[in-house]
Image (cartoon, rainbow, N blue to C red):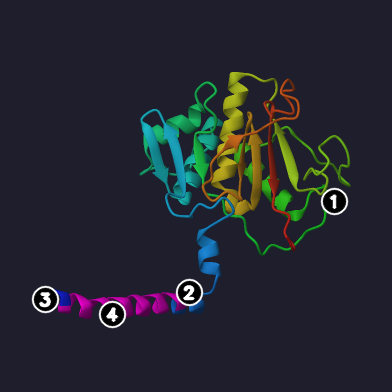
Amino acid sequence: MTVEDTRGGRRGPRRALLGLLLLGMLAAALALLGPGVLSGLRAGDGWLRWGPECTVETSEGEVELDREEAKRATTAVALSARGAEAPDTSGIDEAVLQRLAEGPPEDAGASLRCRGSAAGDLPAQQLTSTGLTPRAEQLREAMTGVFGEQSLGGFAPGGVDQGHGGESTHYDGRAVDVFFRPVTEENRREGWLLAHWLVAHAEDLDVQYVIFDDRFWSAHSPRGQWRDYDAPDPGNEILRHLDHVHVDVLRGGPD
């Protein structure tokens, strides 16, 4: 046996012991912090919640935003479109504001996405006199504050019990439809102004789903990707949500 063999034999057990100590420390840390740490980082589709909160696909490439910047940017372009005073957007890339104001080019889908964050400790709510739950009513008021009076549907005093799919959130007063009719490029642009604003403010307003223009966004997706919406009748522009933005809020209560 050489000197090198002897030293290697001594190092082997020490390395193994060090590895065991590190594993023990990691296990102890996870036990102290609780299993919620990993589940908070990892969501249903298996992706970690790291990375930018929001991104905008511009003509110059993808631009990252934090959530406050996304809220300011979407609010500013919405108010400017109405000729109203807009919040300060200094520090936000002009290419972002231009894309949000102009809307997605052709059939490109959403330009802005934000990571989903569905609150799990909300109480369940009942209908109010408007036919909406308090959370949905708060959402409606917030939209009116930025976009003014809109053409709304999907709810009525006392609630609705027909006209939507079997498990529709309209039936328990959690959903609002905002109409942009007829289906034109200008109305499509205005629809995306609202859809982007809803996603940027989803965390504050407990938004669960936004559906528009053959796409949908979910608060349950930590990556915040918009996905293709498969309408039951591809030839029906209403079912494809081409003429209206559907938005609903979280139900609350036990899962």
The numbered disc on residue 58 is: none
Q: Amino acid at mark 3?
A: Thr
Q: Which of the two residues, 84 or 175, is positioned nearer the viewer here?
A: 175
Q: Where is 234 relative to 12, above or below?
A: above
Magenta span contains residue 13: yes
Q: Secondary structure at mark 4?
A: helix
Marks 4 and 1, how far apart at CA: 73 Å
Q: Secondary structure at mark 3?
A: loop
Counting from the top left corner in percent of width and height, residue 128 is at 82, 53
For marks 1 and 3, the one nearer the N-term is 3
Residue beneath label 3, please? 2
Residue beneath label 1, please? 129
Judged from this view, the residue extending furthest toward the front is: 1
Q: Nearer the viewer, mark 4 or mark 1?
A: 4
Q: Amino acid at mark 1?
A: Ser
Q: Which residues are magenta?
A: 6-27
Marks 2 and 1, how far apart at CA: 47 Å
Residue beneath label 2, please? 30
